[in-house]
Image (spheres, grey):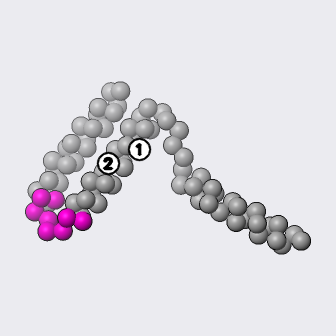
Amino acid sequence: MVMSIVIVMIVILIICSQWTRLHDNKEPVTTWLFFILLTLGTALAIALSFRIDVPSPVDFVTFIFQPISNALQALLHT
């Protein structure tokens, strides 16, 4: 719980330090992208601080390509 409060405080510091650049920026896409990535990173950091098992990107790639690999192996062994 304490770690998540520290993470939120760090995020607030990041927003405060970048606010002038984001506010003066003429491209709203950059501002939206900044906040989306900051929110995703904050959520991931808080999940890790609560010791929630977060899958790695390799697990996602394996999930996508394992059926393709199985189909190719079955096709080549016949």
Dominant secondary structure, magenta: helix
The kind of residue on which mark 1 rests is Leu
Q: Label 1, label 2: how many angstroms apart (C-alpha)?
A: 9 Å
Residue 5 x, y percent position in the rendering: 29, 32
Up the image or down, 56 lies above or below 27; here it is above
Disc assigned to residue 9: none
Residue 4 appears at what percent x and percent y? 33, 33
> Which residue is drawn at the image coordinates 20% and 44% (left, top)?
13
- Return the disc, 1 or 2, that comes first in the chain's sequence: 2
Front-lying residue, 46 or 66 = 66
Residue underneath mark 1: 44
SS at badge 1: helix
Answer left or right for 46 relative to 56. left
The answer to which of 71 and 57 lies nearer the viewer is: 71
Point out the residue furthest to the right here.
78
Question: Given the image, on which type of amino acid does mark 2 rest?
Answer: Thr
Mark seen at residue 39: 2
Is residue 26 magenta-colored? yes
Image point 59% across, 59% down: which residue? 61
> In this rendering, would 38 be left or right of 12?
right
Q: Quadrant of the C terminus?
A: bottom right
| Drawn side of residue 60 relative to residue 49, left or right | right
Q: Quadrant of residue 29?
A: bottom left
Q: Which residues are magenta?
A: 22-29
